[in-house]
Amino acid sequence: MLPAVPFHVPVPASEPVELFPSLRGLVADGERGDWAAVMAHLGGLPGLDDFVVACSQVEGRIADHVLARVPVGDPSWGVAQAMRAARITEEGWKIRGDGWARTVTPPQWAAFREHLNRAEQLLIDVTAREPRLGYAWLERMTTCQGLSLGAAEARRRYDRLSAHAPHTYIAGFRLMQQLLPKWSGSWEQVSAFAAELLRVTPAGSIGLLPVLVAHLERHSAAETDAEAAAYLRDPAVVAEIHLVADRTVRHPAFQPGYRVYTAHDYFAMLFSLMGDHAAAAPHFRALHGRRTPFWEWYFGDAGAAYAGHRDRALARG
Amino acid sequence: MLHRTDVDGVPTLLAPSSGPMTAGLTFRVGLADEGAARIGITHLVEHLALHRHGVADYHYNGATGSVVTHFHMEGSERDIVTYLEMVCDSLADLPVQRLETEKAILRTEAAGRGGGVNRMLPMWRHGAQHYGLVGYPEWGIDRLGPDDVRAWANAWFTRANAVLWISGDRVPPGLRLRLPAGTLRPVPVASTVLPATPAYFTGAGGGVVFDGVMRRHVAGSVFALMLERELFRSLRQESGLSYAASASYDPRGDGMAVVTAFADALPEKQRAVVGGFVDVLAGFRVGRISQTELDAVRAKRDEALRHPDAPAGRLPGLATDLLTGARLRTLDELRAQLYAVALADVHGAALQVLDSGLLQVPPGSRADWAGFAAAPTTSTDAIPGHTYRAVDGSGASLVLGADGVSIVEGECRATVRYRSCAVMHAWPDGARQLVGLDGIAVMIEPALFAAPADTAARIDRSVDPSIVLPMPARNPNDIPRPSTAPATGTFPPSTATVPAPTGGFPPATGGIPRTITVLPPDGSFPPAGR
């Protein structure tokens, strides 16, 4: 049975720690400064995607001196340094703000760049010592974007990550972002990368989801509402979105881990935007009335948009 | 194996060889000794010395380096005697009637040469002086007259400043080296214009180039081989970003050695090559080097040292060592040192090289994000003096002081002090370009500033005449005038070498210099009319 949710009451975003009880223990360990317990939790995770979600929940909560005192040579040194870098990057983005480049003041740029340089130099050391640490390469994809090092360098970092952690959703997501026209890429690069993911990603892998980013971005970049709607009614686009669903959320081998809400968010959102509320319904049901912050990327009033689409889907589906 | 003797007072090295006899005469003089206003004089002397031997071919030649100049020949004992005696006789009495012809040949040679990939690093590290001069055009030759080249030959191409080397059992009978007496000349003392290292600058496209300096040690040659292998493995085999990757270890002559590395890049992959290159260097910095790799390059190096031609092949290098005061090492000593190199030694060499490193990145790139300081592209201050505004109202100004000149535009300053001016190009229309020992250049187009009519004359009075290079008249259309200058073009068309701001970033606080020519990205100094 669905929980009773009043009609169109905006639904707030949930962080992973609110969605997964196991992460609450990790966060508590982190806040207590129990690095060994944090690493024990992280070490039990099955893949880089889960690892990164878990890290994102503790990066900002572990005191810096706890991370800084992990000695070089300790097996957890690389993770500790990458967490420090992630936090410095985050601080940098807070200074910059998330507005368009033209809205950022020169002192903001300078401080932003100084933070990202510092994070990047920590990460250069980490990947030099531990070239297999996907988490560090992922953070280097983030600094790459902020430092405007370009698509070729982003791709190199993605390749280094993928060499040891292939088909990682969040890496594909980052690279897709980098290839967007707004980050000095192009739609041709976006389409080529989506086609590559369709070609190389095994069925059941969460690594295929970034293909959906390409469609969401094309949709939101449309000049008019009519153009946006027409894009998502294009039979080839519709077929591709269903193909991705068949190979991910509808596939028996699909193991989304901590990304389960993300996966259903994508399809709930896309099918709703396509006007296919029946197709969206199972995904809203799978979300159990929760959503991730992802909706805020595409909707001004994300909570209300989510509620509206959900209610339409569940009324019909 | 190695025998030492002397021929007419010239120290001589003999080493056995299985092949045909090769002999050479090496002098302790090169580009680093010339001074910016005389660049090319050693090369010109080398050409004049070889002129009597006819057209250069595969079997004999000369080569002008940074601190030594070689003349060498392969052939019979008789051919070698003829060649070396001709070289010495020509050096002692240069065929100066050939001067203009050889200058023309040098200009043609320069036009076809283009320079190696690492050509720009020395000028960014050392400026327009000593070891930095190898990057500059041979702009000194135009002004040189018969007396200049004769004086140069007499001062540097002397018995005491030469070493003869021969691959073979004996000195060819009858060989006489009729060279003037002289003294063994010390190598120049190096200095750097980089306030902080590791540093970077934005250079020409096509790839990434790096160099760094270390105390001369066999571990450096091992490091260079390992660096080359790792660049190749990472950038070509693993990432497919580069086709060519190389590294070399070269003693500088002053007890130090330079490790240089290069990786090429496709245009669309240039920035990824910067990233990959930085990561390869970082791997060495953190000491991620394996004994297996060390063993592999050691075996390769050892194989080269065991080659039957190795004793003869080392002779030019040994001649250089003898001339620069380095201790001569036998092959056995060298191999023993090679086998004594441990991982810690390679790491130590890598740290020296990386700490002193200079990285050249392609246009549109920078490397501050990787911890490399931007190499200076402008001066830290302007000269005190009288300021003249640009007549086009751009806000730029020319400062004429008692001690030097500056061009100032916003926060950007280019200053050359007369006492540290390396060279000045002087055009008949009054334009002057002064290049400081630090490599910073100031181009003065008097027509663009509300400056006194005698500006050029006043500058000329302050500059040592021996470093003034008169330039041919420019085409009137090429002379910048306020009315024809572009909006920001107070100065000649920019050959800006400064790091371009990358996408999404505004210029750094304080402004990025755009129009002040500092160092030529492509060797196109001076910027106008030759």
Image: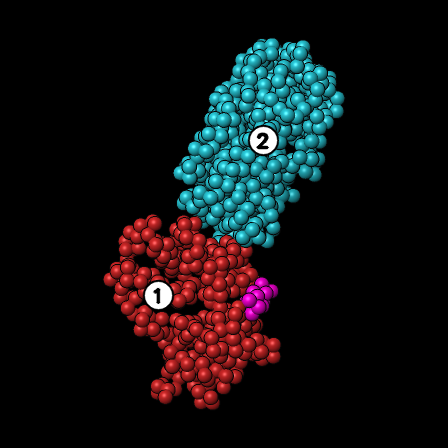
Chain colours: A red, B cyan
Circles 2 and 1 on the same subunit: no
Give the magenta part as a residue range.
A187-200
Q: Where residue A267 appears, x then y in whole percent?
A: 48, 77
Residue that badge 2 annotates = B307
Q: Where residue B275 appears, x then y in whole percent?
A: 50, 50
Assess disc 2: are there few (<14), some (14-19) or many (≥20) residues with their C-alpha within 10 Å of its C-alpha.
few
Residue A246 bears which disc, if any?
A: none
Assess disc 1: are there few (<14), some (14-19) or many (≥20) residues with their C-alpha within 10 Å of its C-alpha.
few
| Residue A89 lies in quadrant | bottom left
Subunit of label 1:
A
Against A266, is B175 above or below?
Answer: above
Which residue occupies the extreme left position in the image? A32
Rounded to the nearest whole Å, what is the CA distance between mark 2 and mark 1?
Answer: 56 Å
Residue A85 visible within the image:
yes
> How many numbered discs?
2
Subunit of label 2:
B
Against A202, is B379 above or below?
Answer: above
Name the residue: 53% across, 44% down: B229
Q: Amino acid at mark 1?
A: Gly
Element type at marker 2?
loop
Element type at marker 1?
loop
Which of the image's four quarters has the C terminus of chain B?
top right
Residue B470 visible within the image:
no
Q: Amino acid at mark 2?
A: His
Residue that badge 1 annotates = A44
Name the residue: 31% across, 73% down: A21
Which of the image's four quarters has the N terminus of chain B?
top right
Residue A299 left/right relative to A65? right
Q: Where residue B334 appears, x then y in whole percent?
A: 49, 28
Name the residue: 49% across, 77% down: A251
| Residue A295 lies in quadrant | bottom left
